[in-house]
């Protein structure tokens, strides 16, 4: 039985929880100053009838990743050179600058090729490639191409510096669509303590058409498409990564799992993507021109969810910060999202349910699509500020004794703040300070403030709260003076359904359809955008 087969059979995969589906009405929330609601209802008009199953936890013994070289000293040496590569084994065919490995074994490569290729063509075999100060470029194809094998290991030799690159557009060499610097048709495991630099101006970085697992090593990947891609799954156990990609930084069509590592995604379109995304640990810092973490699938029947069980995440996104086209579950870790500045996206976005049972979660961004968690076993607060605050604004949440629960400086412009922490009690009183403005918050349950922020600078669609007011009106009290409990508030605004001066960013707000959001299409957003999940909306 292969090592990878044992890994698959022994992997602990726990899926638990069965949550009842619930139809939940969208409630808008906004203010001239800052407001929230104590209502324990949430989600937006994208309500669905199906709630995904919940928590996924994966643990893998490191021994399951032991490469063949760890139990064998029998290495076959391959010396690479433009003037003539050499190897004494009959299992290695050398044709110019193309080296083909045909049998099971451990092969140690050193040297360089200016336009070369390493091919593994060993059906049903376990093959290990040890890279020991290797530098290989290819003008038009993969540098390492696994055509067939059972499992291939790439080991980065200790203290070695390895560089692989594709320098031109891809040209077909067989029936496979080879489009990466490292391209494997079968299971690929990368390990070792050396470093690897991957460059590709025309395609992907590392692609596994089956399972891709990276156990350790130091990586610098720059590419036009996905940096790390596993068709069936991608698992990151540990390692250090610096990634600049033109598409996704880490992608799987099915399952993406991050158990550890230091991952710096400096630029990408979407950061971490899969039908399911599970983050159990690691230090992740990513900047995305679209979504930061995205659970999505082309298969409409596929289960899609994001699970954050641990780790430290800092996300900067122009699209949705965390976008679960399905469900979101947060059980631990520390997550900070600096989300979009446009109202067509949200720092947090999900379709069915979002449940938090542990960890610290902070998301700031635009208010137009702002969402709170739908279920919580700890305090979670959503406040829309009503006006935009700039980069560098200090956000601080303190309890009634003045103790600081969280404090941070915003990296982007924002008009919405979401904070969830085990230190927020279901019956506690808190002060949220944004810049020089304060909002007093009295918890009545674990969830304060509900999603879909309504008109920037205006109130919600008749929901509780509004302009610091009680029930009724256009998101405010009858006289506009009071908090969600009817107590006097700082900000005085009419609660008669009229828009405040300035209105919808100076524009006339769209008319509400009869019955509001109750099963009907919501009004158009600014610039003709529609909320996600409705016809014409963003995905």
Image: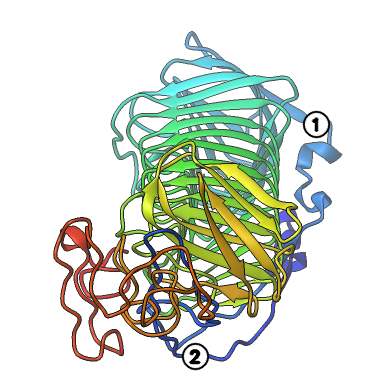
Query: How far apart in space, not on screen, are marks 1 and 2 (Cα)?
Result: 61 Å
**Residue at 41 percent of width and 67 percent of height:** 297
- Number of disc labels: 2
Mark 2, residue position = 22
Q: Which residue is nearer to you in this view: 121 or 56?
A: 56
Name the side, left or right, on which 314 lies relative to 24.
right
Position of 315 with respect to 16 (left or right) is left
Residue 440 x, y percent position in the rendering: 58, 63
The answer to whether residue 289 is visible is yes
**Residue 94 location, x and y as percent?**
51, 25
Instruction: Tell me if label 1 and label 2 are in contact, CB under 8 Å.
Output: no
Q: Quadrant of the N terminus?
A: bottom right
Q: Residues within 10 Å of mark 1 (few under 14, many from 20)?
A: few
Frontmost residue, 415 versus 56: 415
User: Where does label 1 land, which residue?
Assistant: 74
Which quarter shows the C terminus? bottom left
- Closest to the camera, between mark 1 and mark 2, is 2
């Amino acid at each position: 039985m292969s090592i990878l087969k044992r890994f698959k059979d022994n992997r602990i995969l726990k899926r638990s929880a069965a949550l009842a589906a619930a139809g939940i009405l969208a409630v808008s929330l906004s203010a001239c100053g800052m407001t929230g609601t104590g209502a324990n209802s949430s989600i937006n008009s994208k309500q669905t009838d199906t709630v995904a199953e919940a928590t996924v936890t994966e643990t893998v013994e490191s021994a399951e990743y032991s490469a063949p070289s760890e139990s064998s000293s029998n290495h076959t040496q391959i010396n690479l050179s433009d003037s003539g590569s050499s190897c004494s084994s009959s299992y290695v065919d050398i044709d110019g600058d193309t080296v083909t490995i045909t049998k099971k074994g451990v092969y140690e490569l050193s040297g360089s090729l200016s336009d070369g290729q390493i091919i593994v063509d060993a059906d049903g075999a376990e093959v290990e490639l040890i890279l020991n100060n290797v530098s290989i470029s290819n003008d038009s194809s993969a540098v390492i191409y696994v055509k067939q094998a059972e499992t291939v290991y790439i080991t980065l030799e200790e203290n070695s510096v390895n560089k692989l690159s594709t320098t031109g557009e891809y040209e077909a060499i067989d029936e496979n669509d080879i489009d990466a610097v490292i391209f494997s048709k079968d299971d690929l495991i990368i390990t070792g303590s050396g470093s690897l630099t991957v460059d590709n101006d025309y395609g992907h970085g590392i692609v596994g058409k089956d399972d891709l697992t990276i156990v350790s090593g130091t990586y610098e990947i720059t590419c036009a498409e996905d940096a790390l891609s596993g068709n069936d799954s991608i698992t990151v156990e540990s390692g250090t990564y610096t990634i600049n990609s033109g598409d996704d930084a880490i992608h799987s069509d099915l399952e993406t799992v991050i158990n550890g590592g230091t991952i710096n995604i400096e630029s990408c379109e979407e950061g971490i993507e899969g039908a399911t995304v599970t983050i159990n640990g690691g230090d992740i810092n990513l900047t995305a021109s679209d979504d930061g973490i995205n659970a999505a699938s082309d298969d409409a029947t596929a289960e899609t969810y994001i699970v954050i069980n641990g780790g430290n995440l800092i996300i900067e996104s122009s699209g949705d910060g965390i976008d679960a086209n399905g469900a979101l579950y947060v059980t631990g870790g520390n997550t900070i999202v600096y989300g979009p500045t446009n109202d067509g996206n949200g720092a947090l976005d999900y379709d069915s349910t979002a449940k938090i049972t542990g960890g610290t979660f902070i998301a700031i961004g635009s208010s137009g699509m702002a969402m709170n968690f739908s279920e919580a076993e700890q305090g979670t607060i959503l406040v829309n500020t009503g006006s935009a605050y700039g980069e560098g604004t200090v956000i601080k949440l303190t309890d009634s004794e003045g103790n600081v629960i969280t404090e941070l400086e915003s990296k982007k412009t924002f008009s919405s703040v979401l904070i969830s922490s085990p230190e927020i009690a279901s019956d506690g009183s808190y002060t949220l300070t944004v810049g020089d403005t304060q909002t007093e918050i009295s918890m009545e349950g674990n969830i304060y403030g509900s999603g879909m922020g309504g008109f920037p600078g205006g109130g919600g669609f008749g929901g509780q709260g509004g302009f610091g007011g009680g029930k009724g009106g256009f998101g405010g009290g009858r006289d506009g003076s009071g908090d969600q409990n009817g107590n006097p508030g700082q900000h005085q605004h009419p609660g008669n359904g009229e828009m405040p001066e300035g209105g919808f960013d100076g524009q006339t707000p769209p008319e509400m359809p009869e019955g509001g959001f109750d099963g009907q299409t919501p009004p158009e957003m600014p610039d003709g955008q529609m909320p996600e999940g409705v016809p014409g909306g963003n995905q």
